[in-house]
Image: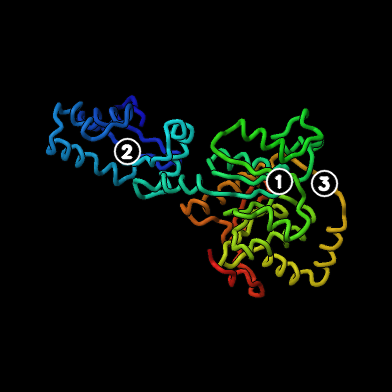
């Protein structure tokens, strides 16, 4: 809330849904200033403004504020609903995120429900390069309770133009251990399982994602083949996953719904015919490649994947990539509907 020079009260919204009260009554102004300063209970407001805390006074104040509650300017004081597992240190660390989660909920306790789901979640991140390392940091920042970090690669100086969480003094060290070391310093609220290994088969994927609630696909070799292994393993386990591929994020696989990497391959084959599988074989045989890179690529991928994964884990809203592909071609990001492919069996996979 901002007090403007003309006497009006301006309510600033991060979503630009601004509201204004012109010439507010003096009692309402006093009440709102008190709420802005200390977020008190209604009884405390009544004591400060009217000098009484009887039911009639509290009811009058409540009726005065009711239009502001309906407009979303005021929200219920929620701290009294704090669950037992949320101590003061945790609340202080995640206070602004709890407020953000509250904007996604219509109930007074919804933000705690959403945050509790993040605290209980286990996400496996396969590939800890530019996008994967940034995604792991972001998932740690939002309070995901457990991460499995999978990568057999080592840090190289040439990586640092886009893999910006590593440093030159880590050159030659394993990415998985280096990243876990940094994340442990960053937050004590996430537990880490470190798997410094490459994924070489579907059974490797099975071992890496055991117990995970979600799989983030950020590795890129062997191209296509790796995605097939992950797709197959996740369908066996009924584990949702999301990957980035060729300038796009998605589709997100969710058991029982259409849309997965298999759908994409069916689409590629319908466009390229047998050449698609010949290309996959050639890519799998290629041991190394070098391509132009810029830091905004992994930053964009990590940002999009983080939001999509949080929406899925919390259940706060349907992710855009569930039934769509987020395609970014700087400076624009667009959502393309993707309802799967009729020849794919993903929608027949068992629901969790």
Proximity of marks 3 and 1: CB atoms separated by less than 8 Å = no
1 vs 2, front mark: 1
As displayed, is residue 350 above or below residue 123? below
Q: In the image, what residue occupies the spot 36% across and 32% down?
A: 1
In primary-sequence order, the first of circles 2 and 3 is: 2
Mark 3, other Cα within 10 Å: few <14 / some 14–19 / many ≥20: few
**Residue 157 makes an appearance in the image:** no
Q: Which residue is denoted by mark 3 in the rendering?
A: 291
Q: Residue furthest bottom?
A: 343
Picture coordinates of residue 238, whole percent (x, y):
59, 63
Query: Residue under circle 1?
Result: 195
Which structural element holds mark 3? loop
Spatial CA span between label 1 and label 2:
41 Å
Residue 85 coordinates in the image, percent (x, y): 43, 40
Secondary structure found at label 2: helix
The colour scheme applied to this rendered structure is rainbow
Residue 198 shown left or right of residue 237 in the figure: right
Q: Mark 3 or mark 1, which has the lower sequence index?
A: 1
Tell me, for residue 61, which label it has, or none. none
* In-image side of 250 versus 86 (left or right): right
Q: Which residue is mark 2?
A: 80
Mark 2: few, some, or many residues within 10 Å (few <14, many ≥20)? Answer: few
């Amino acid at each position: 809330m901002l007090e403007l020079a003309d006497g009006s009260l301006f309510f600033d919204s991060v979503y630009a849904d601004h509201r204004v009260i012109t010439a507010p009554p003096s009692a309402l102004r006093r009440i709102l200033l008190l709420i802005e300063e200390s977020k008190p209970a209604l009884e405390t407001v009544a004591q400060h403004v009217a000098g009484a805390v009887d039911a009639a006074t509290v009811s009058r104040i409540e009726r005065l504020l009711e239009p502001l509650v309906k407009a979303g300017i005021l929200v219920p004081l929620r701290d009294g609903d704090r669950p037992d597992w949320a101590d003061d240190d945790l609340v202080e660390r995640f206070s602004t995120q709890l407020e953000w989660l509250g904007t996604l909920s219509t109930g007074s306790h919804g933000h705690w429900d959403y945050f509790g789901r993040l605290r209980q979640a286990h996400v496996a991140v396969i590939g800890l390069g530019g996008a994967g390392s940034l995604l792991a940091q972001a998932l740690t920042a939002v309070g995901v309770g457990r991460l499995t970090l999978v990568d057999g690669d080592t840090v190289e100086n040439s990586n640092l133009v886009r893999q910006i969480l590593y440093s030159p003094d880590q050159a030659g060290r394993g990415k998985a251990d280096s990243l876990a070391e940094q994340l442990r310093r960053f937050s004590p609220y996430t537990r880490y399982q470190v798997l410094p290994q490459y994924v070489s088969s579907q059974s490797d994927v099975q071992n890496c994602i055991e117990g995970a609630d979600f799989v983030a696909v950020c590795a890129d070799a062997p191209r296509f083949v790796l995605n097939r292994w992950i797709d197959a393993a996740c369908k066996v386990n009924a584990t949702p996953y999301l990957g980035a591929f060729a300038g796009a994020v998605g589709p997100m696989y969710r058991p029982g719904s259409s849309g997965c990497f298999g759908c994409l391959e069916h689409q590629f084959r319908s466009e390229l015919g047998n050449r698609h599988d010949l290309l996959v074989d050639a890519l799998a045989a290629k041991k190394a490649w070098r391509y132009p890179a810029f830091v905004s690529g992994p930053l964009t991928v990590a940002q999009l994947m983080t939001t999509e994964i949080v929406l899925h884990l919390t259940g706060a809203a349907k992710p855009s990539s569930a039934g769509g592909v987020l395609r970014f071609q700087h400076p624009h990001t667009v959502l393309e509907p993707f309802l799967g492919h009729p020849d794919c069996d993903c929608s027949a996979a068992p629901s969790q």
